[in-house]
Image: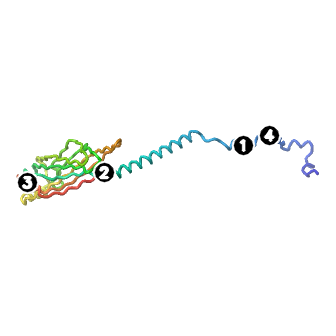
Amino acid sequence: MLSPLKHILTSKDQHLLPPQLPHSSKRQLGGYSRLRHQSRTNPVIWCSAIICLIFSLLLIFFGVATLIIFLDIKPRTPVFDTPSASLTVVYIDSPQFLNSDFTFTANFSNPNRKLDIRFDYLNIELYSFDTLIAARVLQPFTQRRKETRLVPVQMISSLVFLPPNHAVELQRQVQNNRVVYHIRGTFRLRVSLGLLHFSYWLHARCQLELTSPPTGVLVAHSCSTKR
């Protein structure tokens, strides 16, 4: 039985209806649609992902290896000390210029059992109160494991200006037979660990008490060494 729509449309109006596709054409269009959805991954993306994975595994491996080596070697900080010192000259030229001749023994100790170190840069400064009165740069050297190195260092001050209050206090120390000097050391160390090489800075601070010149000797001192 015909629907009401078929009765309304005449034979001349049949061309207005959408054409019916054959069954075979519908199957072809469906297959084409499925192929469009099943697109393949770009090989460049796969290569990038594999490279990132390998790089991450290498980082983890070297990190674990470095930690194991570090725990086995147990690196320790080298030590700087001043076991002996002498003060032969201290006088204030008019009105506030210091002249001084001070000599001390620098003791460098490498406490590591499995690491050799090299001092690439060594700068030592001498202070009276907070005023720099002398400075020396020492020659670089290499220090073997568990080795101690003694280096004599002479610090000469010539016409170094001192603030008035510091000049008065230094003269008082000389009269009381207790002269206080301060040493500051700045060192750059290089450590070799197989194929690995790294550098770091080391800072030393010392306070020394000496008797008055011309036969001033060390009576007390304290030193600290920090990275």
| Label 3 Cα neighbours within 10 Å, binned few <14 / some 14-19 / many ≥20 | many
- Percent position of residue 44, x then y: 56, 39
Q: Nearer the viewer, mark 2 or mark 1?
A: 2
Q: Do the residues labelled 2 and 1 touch (CB within 8 Å)?
A: no
Say left or right for 2 vs 39.
right
- Circle 3: element type: strand
In the depicted view, which residue is nearer to us: 100 or 13? 100
- Percent position of residue 155, x then y: 13, 47
Q: Mark 4 points at which residue?
A: 25
Q: Name the residue under label 3.
A: 216
Mark toward the start of the polypeptide (4 vs 1):
4
Q: What residue type is labelled 4?
A: Ser
- Circle 1: element type: helix
Q: Which amino acid does label 3 sit on?
A: Gly
For the residues marked 2 and 4, what is the alpha-carbon distance in whole angstroms? 78 Å
Q: Name the residue under label 1.
A: 33
